Image (tube, grey):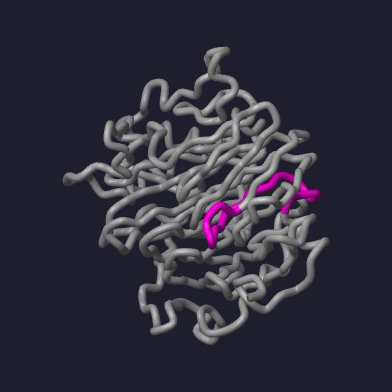
Amino acid sequence: MLLFPLVALIGGVTADRSIAEDDTRSLVVTKVPDYVRPYAVRAYTLDGVRIGPQVYRFPVTGPSSDNAFTLISTTAPASNELGVLPHIHQAHYENFYNLRGRFALWASKDNTTAGRIFTPGDYGAVPHDTTHSFQILDPFTEMVGVIQPGGFEQLFYFLASANYTSSTHAPFPQGNFSSPGGDPDTISKLQEFDVWAQLQFSPPMDFDANGISGDERSAVWKNGANELGEDSKTPFFVAKGYGPKYLTSDSSNSSYYVVEPFVTSAQSDGNFTEGTITLSQKSADAQLDEWVLPGHTALEIVDGLVGVRVQGFEDLSLSVGDVVFVPANTTWSFWGEAAYSKVLYVCQGKDTLDARLQEAGSSWNSVLWPA
């Protein structure tokens, strides 16, 4: 995702295997485990690394997911410069989701360059060998990045200006910091992290009223239905609520799921899926659906309040920005506790949470469940 001023950080941000025996019944951790186990993290409670004014936290890492994927929280203030110099990844598929604020994202491949202004809920896919860059536009912006395979956090440990921790859980510090975009010499030396500089690329800044720049002026964005990429090589964008949608209910027909996929197995060569699930509130007497999946799953709450039950652990209520990680072959449940709730899901493989929900449901034309 990012390339910035080079100051190697000794030790980076370390993961933690030393979880006390009497703590194993609680899912919540303040340091991400360095092995695969169920866990949850609260928003902004993890230590992070600072690169310029931007703070990176890693709710899911290579070690915690057995390199299935890395989940990154990037919080930052507005900047009049690029957040990263243009580059590609040859071996990593990168995904951008906007949780808060606004940012611009550019993706260029096969002689086609496209830019979008992202507001909360928008998504962008950056497959292998796609030149990309971004710029933070609002005073408080938070990007959720998913990178497959996992382990990409090592780049940020290497580039970090400093470790970051906050006793008040401030998303990022105040102050004047060096430019986040980095310098050409630094970015040109990062091939060992699968970062390949594309310094000749100049992002088109002439966004129209629909938030589009580049070669796709006639593209549909927030004015009609958005289609997913035709294959695993094509970059694409999905505006909040404008992508495909599927409706299904729980086994007791007392609450609903609205699945909005961003990446299915068709867009990832079967490696992962990503999208959102909107949840109606579970009725008090409803039986919980239980899930046992062959791949790892992570949920980040993006709206409302979500309950989670993982076999062997205490039930947990999660709010916006909280993340739960559930390993493969683990029995678990999740449900809406607020009148309206929504999660961002990331799943490993083809037989995934979203795939099963879509198979049980049907195509739907609304972002909400039936009245």
Q: Nearer the viewer, residue 205 or 238?
A: 238
The vertical placement of 21 against 126, above or below, is above
Quadrant containing the C terminus is bottom right
Q: Percent from the top left, x then y, of residue 238?
A: 57, 69
Residue occupying image coordinates x 70% and y 31%: 311
Residue 178, picture quadrant: top left
Outermost residue toward the front in this view: 285
Residue occupying image coordinates x 52% and y 56%: 338
Residue occupying image coordinates x 51% and y 51%: 305
Q: Percent from the top left, x then y, of residue 344?
A: 57, 54
Q: Nearer the viewer, residue 52 or 367?
A: 367
Range of the magenta residues?
336-353
The vertical placement of 325 against 180, above or below, is above
The vertical placement of 38 against 272, above or below, is above
Direction from residue 348 to residue 134 in the image, left or right: left
Question: Can the viewer see residue 86?
Answer: yes
